[in-house]
Amino acid sequence: MKNRMMSIIMPIYDRTDILKLAIESALKQTWNAFELLLIMDGSPEETKKVVMEYYDHPRVRIFETKKQTGNACIPRNIGITEASGDYIIFLDSDDLAEPTRLEDSFNGLQSADVIHGEFYVLFEDGTKELRKHKQQNHEELMRGNGLCQSTVACKTEVLRKEKGCKRKMHYMEDYELWCRLSNKGYIIKHIDKILSTYRFHSGNLEKEIGNDSWKDELLKEYKITPEIIDLVDYKEINL
């Protein structure tokens, strides 16, 4: 089954050194059929230089929006639209994928529409902790997000049918998506595999918002599917 294509989607705004580490972790997979979509969202020049180092890499496709869109919704939706793979792997530009991430994700997706797993948290002082989650039903998911974005993998056809992320969710757009998919009856499964390392640092948006600032928006939106995937002008650089 290793000829099944998988697409890793990485939205990018800034970052340099840790971005390169994230890209390298995505490329060093035991799975033998995958592509890495690097989607720059109005990135500064120093970040573009890092991304363009991978211009000639056979597994990499590079996209760029004409201006910064303000959150990761548009880059993720561009990835969902452009992906060649049967499965989509989400990885943020400051996180690290385990070498067996794609292989473990593929195995989990044979009995689910969406999977997520265990992950390490890497703190700024260099210490590392393993975070273990558990299977959540829909009611439990609505009480709190048990899915780490950088461990999630989904069937591409599901994300396209449900039109991806909602731009009006300025934050927690990933959580809204999980709630929406769960509400519609898609199978979301936790797998007992370590899939990634989540880097906890001063730039994490999750630290800047309170639990109530997005919850009303989520409750209004999670049952409603948008008519089209919300995109802005963008181009593929690596043609």
Image (cartoon, grey):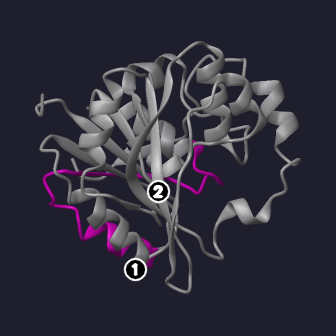
* Quadrant of the drawing holding the N terminus: top left
Query: Residue 238: x and y, percent?
Result: 24, 52
State how far apart marks 2 and 1 are (Cα).
21 Å
Q: Which mark is residue 79?
A: none
Left or right, 80 with respect to 27, comes to right
Residues in magenta, as a range? 45-73
Pair 2/1: label in front: 2
Q: Quadrant of residue 27?
A: bottom left
Which is nearer the eye, 176 or 67? 176
Q: Secondary structure at mark 2?
A: strand
Asked if the stretch drawn in magenta spans residue 50, the answer is: yes
- At numbered mark 1, what does the secondary structure look like: helix, strand or loop? helix
Q: Nearer the viewer, residue 203 or 149?
A: 149
Q: Quadrant of residue 174?
A: top right
Q: Nearer the viewer, residue 84 or 199?
A: 199
Disc 1 target residue: 17
- Hey, what amino acid is under mark 2? Phe
Residue 84 in the image: x percent, y percent? Answer: 26, 32
Residue at 63% x, 52% y: name it: 71
Residue lying at 47% horizontally and 66% vertically, measured from the top left: 94
Q: Amino acid at mark 1?
A: Asp
Q: Tell which residue pokes out farthest to the top in this image.
A: 185
Q: Which residue is mark 2?
A: 119
Q: Residue at x 29, y 63 (%)?
A: 25
